[in-house]
Image (cartoon, rainbow, N blue to C red):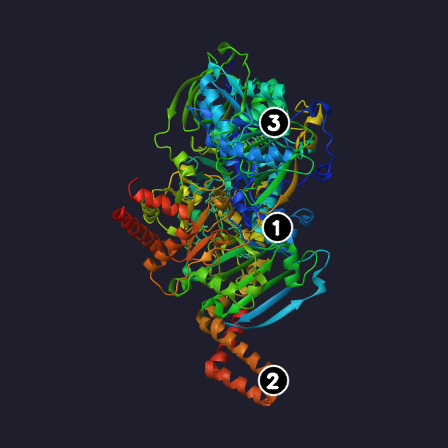
């Protein structure tokens, strides 16, 4: 029933008459995801984005930090400020040491109700999505998932753009008459802002007001991933990827070889996951990882929209494809019309040669 | 202690691999696009069936959608679910996730009144059309169920104690969680493999009566929470992703061999991205 | 949980397959009050039949008179083009008439997936039990050979019935495996490959000069099939165009070109390419068509079983009719079964023999008999029918239409000598004679 994202003709032009109780909602907030001793990079990316929105609105950017230890939270808050937060709300309580839905929902909901932001952004991580859904429903406000673009329209409201129907279309969603306007954004969709070490921000401490006994869900343990290609791929500076054009699992080795010489990560298009040539965490694209490397080399990938949305943020996209009319040439910066099975090893040799010259020289 | 009762929320979705967009109007061209059960929901259904097989009890599948969504319910019955509820009403048209969770949560309550309170409500991780992963958490908040999302494995269920333990996919690792029933679980893909239903199930599914509820039958009195009226978000604009203005600069081939082409490409890469060159050179000289 | 052999799971009739023939049979049987189980191996009825097709209204009208009210019909055909192609030109005949815009049009284009689904819905509403994603693996027979049920691939479970109707399509594996019909011969089946090209409705209307629900069919023969026995076709649907090409399996075995290469050749032919330009290709399907005609019809009935549709080789290869014969044979089979059921007569071979008589009195056997020489003829003269003649025709047309100073009598002379050069006069005559004989 909610399947067809068509503009609601009757309501799309509804004049926004914000109810009295929402009139004093101000400022752009970012939920700063802090786990296992570090801030998730997506939160810093979001602070950069929030900065732009807040400047347009003429308001402040606030970070929200929930965690177990006050010193750690204060340190993280300082970092968030360097990336652009004007102030940070902190709730530090041992109950919040590990993420659990119930206390985190309570904490974030209460902060929103107390300090009244107009926009609340979260990373679309497993944590962020778990939390955002509960908080939005508790507050009975709108939430737009997996946004690829955020903007402020002429009426000061958040225009959140996201892909729909498997990426074939984009739609722009507004939250009418409710505050805060909530949105999640996937890692690497927004650019990482520059840190300014001289920037400092204010801190507002808030109590949690819950006892461990109030919480029925217990964390029994945490098994860290052995190989977290997950994080490495999303944040690698150089990524080499292959698609069906490589024709066999054996040929995919050519992609790995080039990635190894470049000290980068490797990945692939979705069909390769289905074929078992690569694992799911190496899939790049809308239903896989979004990446923004400095250099992306795509070999034998057609460049379908679902793949494109995952790589568009790369600084330099190089495509090798045998078909001159392949879609990937529509958004790549450099192209080679040729057989990837020949070009890849040649490129590996070329880099090897160039780098070894440097090694001798250096 | 009563027998285990599980509700599984499934959604009928267009097979998005087959979706086409009208090049002029940017509308979805549905002609010939088959519908399927949202693939993620099958993992939820199979997990529910496994628990039912182990502990006894019943699995009720629930969907909100147009009348033709009945097809998906029959499919779920053929896999082995015990009963099916179709929630359908014009009042639900245009629901966003908040309005969807209102309708579904109301229906889950009604299912509870009718066939016994569910111990677990299962959802898929997300749908392939809405793609929000919000509906599960939304239902959990509304019904105050303990929320377990991205569950890879149900490690333990103790009906006596009303306790459940799961492995949950978290950032950078796996969380081991325990909580109390009733709970809402959203299942991760790849967590199990859907069974082949028996011929008896398939026959029963073909002949089954499907419970069809409109808003009133599901106990919904206030239609202001439903459909467009109950949706805080609106879609203002739908459009096709724009094409880039500049196509890729092609490396000249000129009948050269692969090595010459590769060297040319490498030079072009370094010209455009001196930073990459600098990084690589630093790496190569072992710093 | 129900167990496989509950008493209410014994059916009067099991129908294998939910294509046009199986649906026709199951519908008529269920309406006649019989307990019917229909088994289909596809995910849903029509899921294995992704192609577009032509629907002949008459056969369906006799089963569901008001089908036009809600069946998913694409366009009604107001224009038929028959083209002879050579590599860069075509000679053709177009017939278009306002008469086809009648109130109850005679031919429609359809897309099988939604159409079969619609038909199946009717079958269910009529009271039949339909189970999909279930393949019948074999017939269950008594010592004496009487068919009393089927075994399925769902854990090998068995369902029993008084009678089984095989509507399983051209492969007919169930019938084959049970020794009720012979294996298919490569020279009596064609392999058709087909694609759906999606275009906005407005574009199709403009390219084919159509308005409203009007549609066009193009049938093409000639050098595109590389001298093999076969034809290419193009139908307009509402928002898509079905294009395909079919050739005898035996030719593909010996020929040089693979099916998709032929299709590519057809699609890129200068007469066809502009019609498809800019379309999004979504489905690629390959399917067999029985083309053996009358001479390849197997035994159609026996103790407790009947064969309907493509499984009985009921396809008129020349006019590309199949679904109408499928539906008619399904209906006739069902009518006989209902009659015997009402009379409490057993479904014995003697009683079911009447099915053959009913078919003989219908257009199904009459047409198949009329055209029975055609498959053989086409096969023996394929090189000329599908290569030489189209080329000659095209050359002739060009000679005739090109204004180059030669007088018309001279042009006639050129044409005749061209014909003679490529195909001896006696060859021409003998082909014409054979064709006439086959057609009669
Ligand atoms: C809901 C949904 C989500 C999706 N999510 C994703 C996603 O996250 N990521 C993703 O990648 N896809 C995704 N897809 C699939 C996507 O639509 C495409 O099908 C997929 O990206 C195609 O993969 P490919 O380019 O490897 O294969 P193909 O489309 O088959 O392309 C192969 C390419 O290789 C070229 N080629 C062939 N031989 C050679 C050669 N010797 N040398 C060089 N080039 C050669 C061909 O010209 C062609 O362009 C999704 C689809 C849907 C419906
Ligand atoms: C490319 C092409 C174009 C055509 N165009 C036309 C046209 O324009 N007009 C026309 O009238 N005819 C056309 N035909 C012919 C027409 O499609 C067939 O004659 C018609 O579909 C026959 O119907 P049927 O029910 O006998 O078989 P089918 O439609 O083949 O149906 C058989 C069904 O049985 C199922 N089945 C098979 N084996 C088993 C099993 N063991 N257990 C369970 N289920 C099983 C199959 O999945 C299938 O759904 C065309 C055929 C092709 C291939
Ligand atoms: N209309 C619906 N009917 C039943 N369940 C639904 C519906 N929409 C969503 N769900 C459930 O909620 C999950 C998440 O959906 P979504 O938030 O749309 O990604 C799905 O996997 C389903 O289990």
* Marks 2/1: CA–CA distance: 45 Å
Of the numbered discs 3 and 1, the one sitting upstream in the chain is 1
Mark 2 element type: loop
Q: What subunit carries mark 1?
A: B
Left or right of residue B172: residue B10: right
Which residue is at the front of the view, A49 or C224? A49
Numbered circles on residues, count: 3
Q: Is residue C366 visible?
A: no
Which residue is at the front of the view, A223 or C437? A223
Does the beta carbon of the residue at mark 1 sit less than 8 Å from ligand 1?
no
Residue B245: percent from left, percent from top = 55, 54
Instruction: Determine which residue is flagged by label 3.
Output: B101
Residue B22 is labelled as 1
* Disc 3 + disc 1, Cβ < 8 Å: no
Residue C403 is labelled as 2
Number of residues whose C-alpha sits closer than 10 Å to that of mark 2, classed few (under 14), some (14–19) or many (20 or more): few
């Amino acid at each position: 029933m909610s399947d067809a994202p068509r503009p609601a003709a009757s309501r799309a032009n509804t004049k926004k008459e914000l109810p009295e109780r929402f009139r004093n909602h101000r400022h752009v907030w970012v939920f700063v995801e802090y786990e296992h001793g570090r801030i998730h990079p997506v939160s810093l990316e979001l602070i950069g984005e929030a900065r732009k929105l807040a400047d347009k609105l003429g308001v402040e950017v606030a970070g929200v930090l929930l965690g177990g230890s006050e010193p750690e939270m204060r340190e993280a808050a300082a970092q968030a400020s360097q990336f652009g937060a004007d102030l940070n709300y902190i709730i530090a309580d041992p109950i919040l040491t590990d993420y659990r839905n119930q206390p985190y929902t309570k904490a974030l909901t209460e902060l929103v109700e107390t300090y009244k932001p107009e926009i609340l952004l979260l990373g679309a991580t497993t944590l962020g999505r778990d939390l955002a859904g509960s908080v939005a429903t508790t507050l009975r406000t709108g939430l737009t998932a997996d946004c690829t673009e955020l903007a402020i329209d002429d009426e000061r409201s958040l225009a959140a753009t996201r892909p729909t129907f498997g990426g074939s279309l984009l739609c722009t969603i507004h939250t009418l008459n409710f505050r805060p306007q909530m949105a999640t954004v996937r890692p690497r969709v927004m650019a990482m802002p520059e840190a300014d070490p001289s920037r400092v921000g204010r801190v507002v401490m808030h109590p949690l007001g819950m006892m461990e006994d109030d919480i029925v869900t217990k964390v029994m343990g945490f098994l860290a991933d052995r190989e977290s290609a997950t994080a490495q791929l999303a944040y690698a500076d150089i990524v080499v990827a292959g698609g069906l054009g490589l024709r066999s699992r054996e040929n995919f080795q050519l992609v790995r070889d080039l990635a190894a010489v470049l000290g980068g990560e490797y990945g692939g298009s979705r069909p390769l996951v289905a074929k078992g040539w690569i694992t799911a965490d190496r899939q790049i694209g809308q239903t896989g990882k979004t990446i923004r490397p400095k250099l992306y080399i795509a070999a034998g990938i057609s460049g379908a929209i679902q793949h494109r949305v995952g790589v568009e943020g790369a600084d330099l996209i190089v495509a090798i494809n045998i078909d001159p009319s392949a879609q990937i040439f529509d958004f790549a910066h450099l192209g080679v019309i040729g057989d990837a099975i020949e070009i890849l090893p040649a490129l590996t040799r070329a880099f090897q040669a160039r780098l070894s010259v440097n090694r001798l020289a250096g | 202690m009563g027998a285990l009762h599980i509700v599984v929320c499934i959604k009928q979705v267009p097979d998005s691999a087959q979706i086409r967009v009208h090049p002029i109007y940017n509308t979805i061209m549905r002609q010939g696009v088959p519908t399927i059960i949202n693939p993620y929901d099958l993992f939820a259904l199979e997990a529910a069936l496994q628990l039912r097989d182990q502990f006894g009890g019943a699995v009720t599948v629930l969907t909100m959608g147009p009348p033709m969504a009945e097809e998906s319910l029959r499919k779920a019955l053929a896999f082995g679910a015990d009963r099916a509820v179709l929630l359908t009403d014009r009042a639900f048209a245009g629901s966003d996730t908040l309005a969807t969770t209102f309708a579904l949560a109301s229906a889950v309550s009604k299912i509870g009144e009718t066939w016994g309170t569910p111990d677990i409500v299962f959802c898929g991780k997300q749908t392939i059309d809405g793609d929000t992963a919000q509906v599960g958490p939304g239902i959990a908040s509304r019904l105050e169920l303990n929320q377990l999302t991205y569950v890879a494995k149900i490690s333990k269920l103790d009906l006596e104690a009303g306790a459940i333990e799961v492995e949950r996919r978290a950032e950078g690792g796996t969380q081991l969680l325990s909580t109390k029933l009733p709970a809402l679980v959203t299942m991760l893909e790849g967590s199990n493999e859907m069974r082949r239903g028996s011929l008896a199930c398939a026959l029963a599914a073909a002949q089954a009566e499907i419970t069809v509820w409109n808003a009133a039958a599901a106990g919904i009195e206030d239609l202001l929470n439903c459909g467009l009226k109950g949706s805080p978000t609106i879609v203002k604009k739908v459009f096709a992703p724009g094409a880039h203005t500049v196509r890729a600069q092609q490396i000249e081939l000129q009948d050269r061999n692969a090595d010459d082409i590769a060297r040319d490409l490498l030079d072009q890469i370094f010209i455009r991205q001196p930073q990459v060159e600098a990084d690589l050179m630093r790496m190569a000289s072992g710093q | 949980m129900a167990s496989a052999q509950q008493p209410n799971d014994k059916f009067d009739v099991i129908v294998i397959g939910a294509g046009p023939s199986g649906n026709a049979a199951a519908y008529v049987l269920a309406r006649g009050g019989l307990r019917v189980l229909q088994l289909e191996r596809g995910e849903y009825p029509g899921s294995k039949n992704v192609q577009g097709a032509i629907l002949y209204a008459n056969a369906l009208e006799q089963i569901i008179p008001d089908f036009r009210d809600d069946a998913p019909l694409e366009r009604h055909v107001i224009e038929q083009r028959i083209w002879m192609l050579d590599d860069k030109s075509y000679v053709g005949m177009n017939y278009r008439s306002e008469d086809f815009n009648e109130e109850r049009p005679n031919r429609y284009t359809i897309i099988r997936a939604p159409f079969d689904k619609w038909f199946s819905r009717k079958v269910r509403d009529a009271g039949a039990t339909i189970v999909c994603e279930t393949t019948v693996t074999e017939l269950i027979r008594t010592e004496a050979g009487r068919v009393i049920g089927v075994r399925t691939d769902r854990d090998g479970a068995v369902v029993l019935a008084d009678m089984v109707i095989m509507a399983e399509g051209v492969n007919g594996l169930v019938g084959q495996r049970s020794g009720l019909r012979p294996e298919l011969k490569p020279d009596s089946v064609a392999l058709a490959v087909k694609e759906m090209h999606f275009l906005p409705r407005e574009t199709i209307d403009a390219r084919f000069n159509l308005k409203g629900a009007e549609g066009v069919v193009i049938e093409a023969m000639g050098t595109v099939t590389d001298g093999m026995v076969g034809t290419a076709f193009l139908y307009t649907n509402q928002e898509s165009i079905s294009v395909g090409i079919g050739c005898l399996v035996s030719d593909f075995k010996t020929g040089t070109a693979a099916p998709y290469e032929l299709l590519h050749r057809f699609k890129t032919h200068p007469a066809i390419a502009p019609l498809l330009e800019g379309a999004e290709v979504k489905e690629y399907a390959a399917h067999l068509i029985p083309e053996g005609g009358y001479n390849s019809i197997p035994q159609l009935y026996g103790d407790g079983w009947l064969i309907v549709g493509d499984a009985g080789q009921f396809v008129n290869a020349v006019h590309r009719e199949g679904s109408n014969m499928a539906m008619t044979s399904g209906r006739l089979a069902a009518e006989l079964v209902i009659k015997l059921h009402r009379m409490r007569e057993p479904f014995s071979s003697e009683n079911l023999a009447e099915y053959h008589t009913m078919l003989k009195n219908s257009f199904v056997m009459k047409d198949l008999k009329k055209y029975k020489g055609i498959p053989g003829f086409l096969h023996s003269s394929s090189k000329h029918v599908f290569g030489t003649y189209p080329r000659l025709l095209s050359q002739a047309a060009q000679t005739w239409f090109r204004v180059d100073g030669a007088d018309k009598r001279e042009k006639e002379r050129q044409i005749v000598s061209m014909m003679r050069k490529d195909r001896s006069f006696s060859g021409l005559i003998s082909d014409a004679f054979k064709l006439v004989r086959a057609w009669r």
